[in-house]
Image (cartoon, rainbow, N blue to C red):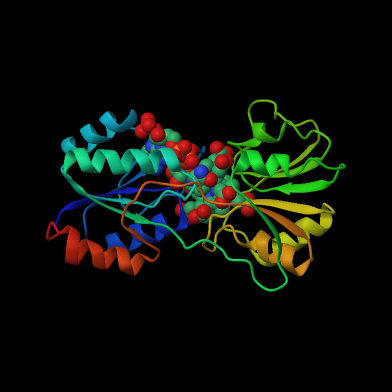
Amino acid sequence: MGKTLILGGSTLATALASEMAAAGRPAVLSYAGRTESPLAQPVPTRTGGFGGVGGLVTFLNENSITSVIDATHPFAVQMSTHAIEAANIAGVNLLALEPDPWAAAPGDKWACVADIEAAAVALADVAQRIFLAIGRLNLASFASQPQHHYLLRLVDRPKIPLPLPKTTVIVERGPFTLEEDVALMKTHEIDLVVAKNAGGEGARAKIDAARSLKLPVIMIERPAIAERRVVSTVSEAMHWLVHEADLGV
Ligand code: 3Y8
Ligand code: NAP
């Protein structure tokens, strides 16, 4: 059996790493180094960017990687794009592992927008109390709507001033529960939720909480990523490894 690079940073990546460790399959999980203390993993990890496509190709070759499973996140577009290009150059098998997108359920009050900038435009309205639960990396896009009070949930305490004048910051890493998100949104008298369509279970509590509280949601749709093989479960990824990647299919 070959050696697998897991591009990590998600619940599915962590679950895959556990399965691979249990199966005794050689793997290394990679973090970007975005957070101060990433979750420990049952396989060796590496942290930090590869240095673009070229750096990733070098890593694949120098570490005798035979397959890459991109389990980053539907919004980690640059990493996913680099993985497609580098796997092609290095002649390594690539699979994406990501959850299916959430679909609106009866009772949901979603306004779907194409991207983060469109979400900010959709907030051009009188001041509200907004649960902006999209992390830290894209907050600057909302500086055009300073009238709102934003409840921000971040993985680490921000080290530099935030680009928004009125904020309440919660420092917490997911996954989150429906009960805690209902309580959080009641405590902070939230009027509206902004979310990325991450899919999966780790980030969906706020969507279910919005439904039960009858609150509107601005749902940011996933960015387009070039064609690649995608599965949505760890068992499909393990099957691919054994029946395709190992056989060089
Ligand atoms: C650094 C690794 C695991 C992975 C757990 C999942 C679930 C909990 C929910 C909300 C939404 C958000 C955010 C979120 C969730 C999981 C998963 C997920 C959303 C860690 C992690 C890393 C990151 C990076 C971080 C981003 C941010 C996004 C917070 C670890 C904890 C909002 C995505 O401050 C920052 O720089 C944070 C940056 C990229 C998006 C953004 O634009 O800010 N994830 N999250 C990974 C690395 O260094 O490579 O620290 O352990 C992982 C997890 N976060 O193993 O169990 O699978 O999605 N992550 C979103 O969905 O919108 C929170 O609050 O409701
Ligand atoms: P991104 O914008 O697609 O990637 C930007 C650059 O960060 C990449 O080109 C690469 O640098 C580096 N990078 C990203 N993921 C990496 C990884 N797993 N290992 C090594 N380098 C990585 O990525 P992002 O959206 O900032 O996401 C960063 C991390 O947070 C990823 O691990 C992702 O799984 C996790 N995450 C992101 C989101 C989200 O909403 N974006 C949500 C949950 C988790 P080089 O070009 O130098 O190689």
Front position in the image: 178 or 18? 178
Whether residue 48 is visible to the viewer of this picture, yes or no, is no
Q: Quadrant of residue 151?
A: top right
Q: Is residue 240 left or right of residue 165?
A: left
Q: Is residue 176 left or right of residue 162?
A: left
Q: Is residue 102 above or below residue 140?
A: below
How far across and down, in percent of the image, does residue 5 sit?
A: 27, 47
Farthest bottom residue? 106
Q: Quadrant of residue 170?
A: top right
Residue at figure coordinates x 84%, y 36% from the top left: 147
Front position in the image: 108 or 21? 108
Whether residue 59 is visible to the viewer of this picture, yes or no, is yes
Question: Which quadrant does the N terminus fall into?
Answer: bottom left
How far across and down, in percent of the image, does residue 149 sit?
A: 82, 41
Q: Is residue 124 left or right of residue 39?
A: right
Residue at figure coordinates x 28%, y 60% from the top left: 20
Farthest top residue? 160
Residue at figure coordinates x 33%, y 38% from the top left: 82
| Number of residue marks | 0
Q: Is residue 193 above or below residue 204?
A: above
Residue at figure coordinates x 30%, y 63% from the top left: 237
Question: Which quadrant does the C terminus fall into?
Answer: bottom left
Front position in the image: 103 or 12? 103
How far across and down, in percent of the image, does residue 45 sit?
A: 33, 44
How far across and down, in percent of the image, does residue 226 sit?
A: 37, 46
